[in-house]
């Protein structure tokens, strides 16, 4: 029998994004627990989310966006902590490839996150303290189950599209496997059906950096009024390198010195790339929780979709009616094109409808977040084609199914 966490009354929320998010929230009580892969029935559960656009009368135009490791629900709106624009506003909005004049876009903070969905920074109802490491370990499938609860809460039966990159792409693939009848089309970008040993290794370096910080305090830093900022910053710096490509780093930074004519013969940030990485680390700690970083990287590590089907990935999609468009980037060495091809081969073997695009760019893994015309054209073309197949209006309002 699964054990249940937190069946007491919900305490007064803390004045932070973990418990008082600047977004919509859906709350599920003890009678609606989230059953996790680790055997825990998690309740109460809060899912923080944002929506954009309008749900149509027959609720057939909903698009679910799944965020990557360090993303959140603020996909196309200003981030409440940083003041920066949404992380995928190049892709989502009026007239954009995922057009909010046509579609009702949903994006939620994943369970285990730190922007309002229940996670290690949330206050546990049993003692009104942050869960910290008492929070159960979650998986990609758990994230998708929580999203399905939110979609049910919003009264949506079938999603027109589920889209996302990196960890978001893992969620897209899991959605297609777990709820094939609820996904009309799927857009997994720069992702894989399992995490590689190399990627697990990079994640472990980041986790060890966090846990080696004296201010981590065995995960109880929030209740002590501390934060392992140095460890989390180093974790972010190491990870950020994997999101880029060597050609892009050379083009942008090379061996250029930072605001100086000669080396200082010290361990200051002599090179521009050093200064850039330090900035990335400093800015990251302003918006992300260290324990959430541990939990979400672990969820990615555990992801192996074929393992649930006796090692045969094609079985995950057997009989699927979902339309797929798989996208990869030539310079992405974190999730190389070979990972996407493995997904495409499995989809072909299962008889699924799939198209595949490899985009040539030197921008590395982060290309899916950047201003990349080829990605926008691919997304727009796929979305428009799928919309026609479903009888949804085109960009000009024509083509809708009537009667």
Image (spheres, helix red, strand yellow):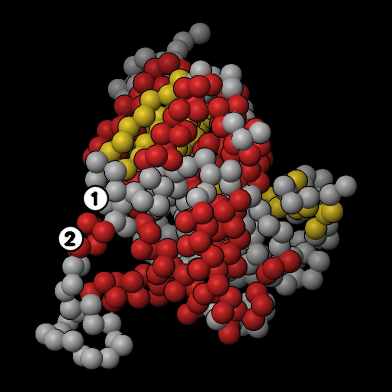
Q: Which residue is mark 2?
A: 251
Camera-nearest residue between 203 and 285? 203
How crowded pointer 1 is (Cα within 10 Å; few <14, some 14-19, many 20+) is rated as some
Q: Residue at x 48, y 56 (%)?
A: 199
- Left or right: residue 380 versus residue 202 is left
* Residue 317 drawn above or below residue 327: above
SS for callout 1: loop
Residue 312 appears in the figure: yes
Callout 2 touching callout 1 (CB < 8 Å) = yes
Q: Residue at x 60, y 68 (%)?
A: 291
- Left or right: residue 306 versus residue 107 is right
Camera-nearest residue between 362 and 91? 362
Q: Which residue is mark 1?
A: 362
Residue 56 appears in the figure: no
Camera-nearest residue between 383 and 240? 240
State the mark number for residue 297: none
- Estimate the x, y position of residue 380 in percent, counting from the top left: 32, 31
Q: Residue at x 41, y 47 (%)?
A: 335
């Amino acid at each position: 029998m699964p054990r249940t966490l937190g069946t007491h009354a919900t305490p007064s929320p803390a004045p932070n994004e973990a418990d008082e998010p600047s977004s919509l929230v859906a709350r599920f009580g003890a009678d609606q627990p989230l059953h996790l892969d680790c055997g825990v029935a998690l309740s109460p559960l809060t899912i923080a989310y944002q929506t954009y656009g309008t749900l149509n009368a027959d609720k057939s135009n909903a698009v679910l966006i799944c965020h990557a490791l360090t993303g959140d629900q603020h996909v196309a709106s200003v981030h409440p902590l940083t003041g920066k624009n949404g992380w995928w506003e190049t892709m989502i909005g009026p007239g954009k490839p995922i057009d909010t004049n046509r579609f009702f876009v949903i994006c939620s903070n994943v369970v285990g996150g730190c922007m309002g969905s229940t996670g290690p920074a949330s206050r546990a109802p049993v003692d009104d303290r942050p869960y910290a490491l008492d929070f159960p370990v979650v998986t990609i499938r758990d994230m998708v189950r929580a999203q399905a609860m939110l979609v049910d809460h919003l009264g949506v039966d079938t999603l027109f599209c589920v889209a996302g990159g990196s960890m978001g792409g893992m969620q897209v693939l899991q959605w297609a496997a777990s709820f094939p009848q609820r996904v009309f089309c799927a857009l997994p970008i720069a992702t894989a059906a399992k995490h590689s040993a190399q990627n697990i290794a990079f994640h472990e370096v980041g986790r060890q950096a966090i846990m080696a910080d004296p201010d981590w305090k065995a995960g109880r830093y929030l209740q002590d009024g501390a934060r392992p900022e140095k460890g989390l910053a180093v974790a972010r710096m190491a990870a950020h390198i994997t999101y880029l490509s060597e050609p892009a780093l050379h083009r942008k930074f090379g061996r250029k010195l930072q605001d100086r004519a000669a080396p200082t013969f010290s361990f200051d940030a002599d090179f521009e790339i050093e200064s850039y990485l330090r900035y990335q680390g400093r800015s990251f700690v302003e918006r992300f929780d260290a324990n959430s970083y541990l939990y979400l990287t672990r969820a990615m590590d555990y992801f192996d979709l074929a393992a649930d089907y006796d090692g045969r990935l094609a079985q995950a999609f057997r009989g699927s009616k979902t339309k797929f468009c798989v996208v990869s980037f030539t310079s992405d060495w974190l999730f190389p094109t070979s990972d996407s091809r493995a997904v495409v081969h499995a989809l072909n073997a299962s008889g699924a409808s799939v198209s595949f695009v490899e985009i040539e760019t030197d921008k590395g893994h982060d290309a899916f977040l950047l201003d990349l015309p080829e990605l926008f054209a691919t997304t727009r073309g796929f979305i428009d084609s799928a919309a026609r197949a479903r009888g949804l209006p085109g960009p000009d309002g024509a083509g809708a199914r009537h009667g």
